[in-house]
């Protein structure tokens, strides 16, 4: 009898939040569980792997968060905070959003990994809670690759609303990371290049921060990946968007799962990640019905091609760059 294959174990760092979300097709009056680390963990567990979430939570949502994480099969290592993080998100028709602050959680203290073995580490701050010291400490104990979603390293609060800037913390942590995945706003902030008009220039400039693999996601236009030699364009899986919150987070979750299986096939990793994100945007909140079978089915559709960005350009396969 064959022994069951042990699950991959993925560590996600970043404060969970409870957000209030308004989109052109959805208005939620309740506060819904979200956050980069949370959404990535949800994707990982729904795909059949194991997720361990590290973050801080206040007494206002502590009991609810513990219950929610247990319900979704996510192991939580939670530190106390004065309050729980959260945003009011208002999306326009294109998917751009404004963020108003509902709560600010405390930074994550230096987390000791101990004897646990992880296969991947996600750094997913939502508002500056991950420090370079925390990352350096983890890297002395964990040999796994690190993927950075930099959103929370590029935010500061101005008059109760989130503004964006390129921080010293981002620069340092990007250089400590194996993979950096930025959306178009984040890529524009840290590179000064508009990804919609020059996606190749943006992803190459992002790579220059010192990571091994750079990814720029472009919502409905797809994503672009660069590893210093290969440049790969990934289409978006065409779907009807209900709520784009968490699309990039679940993209990261899917990318980690597939990268652990086929690290040399960036096209497959990107198409799988795009497929996972497409399930998220069709829904709202942690209840999105992601399965491994559906992610694989959508990946096959994307892999059949053509592999192009939805920016009016022709097909562009993997190719060498000088």
Image (cartoon, helix red, strand yellow):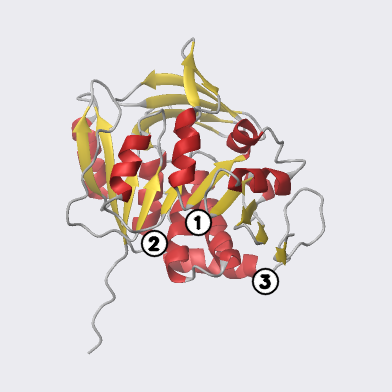
Query: In the rendering, at what x and y percent does residue 41 appear?
Result: 35, 50
For mark 3, give the secondary structure. loop
Q: Is residue 93 left or right of residue 28?
A: right
Q: Is residue 15 visible?
A: no
Q: Residue at x 62, y 55 (%)?
A: 225
Query: In the rendering, at what x and y percent does residue 296 appear?
Result: 51, 68
Q: CA distance from mark 3 to mark 1?
A: 17 Å
The disc label shown at residue 47, or none = 2
Compared to residue 272, the image places residue 101 above or below, namely above
- Residue count near mark 3 (Cα–Cα under 10 Å), binned few <14, some 14–19, many ≥20: few
For mark 1, give the secondary structure. helix
The disc label shown at residue 304, or none = 3
Lower sequence index among marks 2 and 1: 2
Q: Residue at x 53, y 55 (%)?
A: 212
Residue 191, image quadrant: top right
Lower sequence index among marks 2 and 3: 2
Q: Is residue 248 visible?
A: yes
- Residue count near mark 1 (Cα–Cα under 10 Å), binned few <14, some 14–19, many ≥20: many
Lower sequence index among marks 3 and 1: 1
Q: CA distance from mark 2 to mark 1?
A: 9 Å
State the residue in front, 109 or 75: 109
Q: Is residue 321 left or right of residue 54?
A: right
Q: CA distance from mark 2 to mark 3?
A: 22 Å
Assign the C terminus to one quadrant of the image: bottom right
Q: Name the residue that disc number 1 marks.
A: 276
Query: In the rendering, at what x and y percent does residue 260 appear?
Result: 42, 66
Q: Are marks 2 and 1 in contact (CB under 8 Å)?
A: yes
């Amino acid at each position: 009898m064959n022994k069951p294959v042990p699950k991959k174990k993925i560590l996600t760092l970043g404060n969970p939040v409870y957000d209030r979300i308004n989109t052109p097709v959805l208005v939620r009056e309740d506060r819904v569980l979200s956050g980069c680390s949370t959404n990535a963990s949800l994707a990982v567990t729904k795909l059949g792997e194991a997720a361990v979430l590290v973050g801080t939570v206040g007494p206002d949502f502590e009991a609810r968060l513990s219950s929610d994480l247990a319900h979704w099969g996510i192991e939580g290592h939670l530190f106390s905070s004065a309050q729980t993080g959260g945003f009011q998100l208002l999306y326009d028709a294109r998917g751009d959003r404004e963020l108003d602050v509902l709560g600010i959680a405390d930074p994550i203290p230096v987390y000791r990994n101990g004897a646990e073995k992880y296969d991947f580490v996600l750094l997913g701050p939502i508002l500056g809670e991950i420090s370079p010291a925390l990352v350096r400490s983890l890297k002395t104990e964990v040999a796994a690759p690190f993927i950075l979603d930099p959103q929370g390293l590029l935010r500061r609060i101005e008059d109760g609303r989130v503004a964006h800037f390129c921080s010293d913390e981002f620069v340092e942590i990007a250089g400590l990371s194996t993979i950096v995945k930025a959306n178009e706003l984040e890529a524009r902030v840290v590179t000064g290049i508009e990804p919609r008009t020059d996606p190749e220039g943006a992803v190459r400039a992002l790579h220059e921060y010192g990571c091994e693999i750079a990814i720029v996601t472009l919502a409905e236009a797809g994503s672009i990946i660069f590893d210093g030699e290969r440049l790969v364009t990934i289409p978006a899986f065409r779907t009807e968007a209900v709520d784009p919150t968490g699309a990039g987070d679940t993209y990261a979750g899917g990318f980690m799962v597939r990268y652990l299986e086929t690290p040399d096939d960036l096209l497959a990793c990107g198409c799988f990640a795009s497929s996972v994100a497409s399930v998220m945007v069709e829904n709202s909140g942690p209840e999105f019905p992601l399965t491994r079978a559906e992610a694989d089915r959508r990946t096959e559709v994307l892999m059949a091609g053509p592999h192009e960005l939805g920016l009016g350009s022709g097909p562009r396969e993997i190719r060498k760059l000088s």
